[in-house]
Image (cartoon, rainbow, N blue to C red):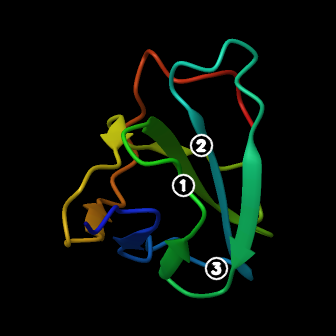
Amino acid sequence: KIEQKSITLVWREPSYPNSSRTGYEVKYYEKEQKDQSYSTVKTAATRISVNNLKPGTTYVFLIRPFSTPAPSSALSSSPLSSSSSTSSSSSTSSSSSSSSSSPPPI
């Protein structure tokens, strides 16, 4: 039986004029976790694989660029559940909208 323990997130690079962006910060947590303690991964790419996820658990992912001239708001995913699927791909748009139910700013 194959259990999905990882996910690959892919997003488009936002277009900011005169940006000095050096990478992206990806934070994630288990949706049902009471303290919402985050795990954080930094990358220079617009694609990342997150491993060691608990099968059958719903996670929330936040992606934001860092080292930009002005603070940037995080992009929040819809809650994502790991399952027994063989697919491990999800896309997040680079729109500037943010969810009203997102956790406190990063």
> Residue 101 vs residue 26: left or right?
left
User: In the figure, 5 relative to 37: above or below?
Assistant: below
- Where residue 97 sits in the image (x, y, percent)? 37, 38
Residue behind mark 3: 18
Which residue lies at the image location 57% right of the left edge and 69% below the top edge? 51
How packed mark 2 is, by other alpha carbons closer than 10 Å (few <14, some 14-19, many 20 or more), is some
Residue behind mark 2: 73
Give whichever of 48, 103 is nearer the camera: 48
Q: Earlier in the sequence, mark 3 or mark 1?
A: 3
- Give the residue type at disc 3: Asn
The numbered disc on residue 28 is: none
Give whichever of 44, 27 is nearer the camera: 27
Q: Report the quarter where the N terminus lies.
A: bottom left
- Distance from label 1 to label 2 (Cα)? 25 Å
How packed mark 1 is, by other alpha carbons closer than 10 Å (few <14, some 14-19, many 20 or more), is some
How packed mark 3 is, by other alpha carbons closer than 10 Å (few <14, some 14-19, many 20 or more), is few
Judged by depth in the image, the label closer to the viewer, 3 or 1, is 1
- Where residue 10 sits in the image (x, y, percent)? 37, 74
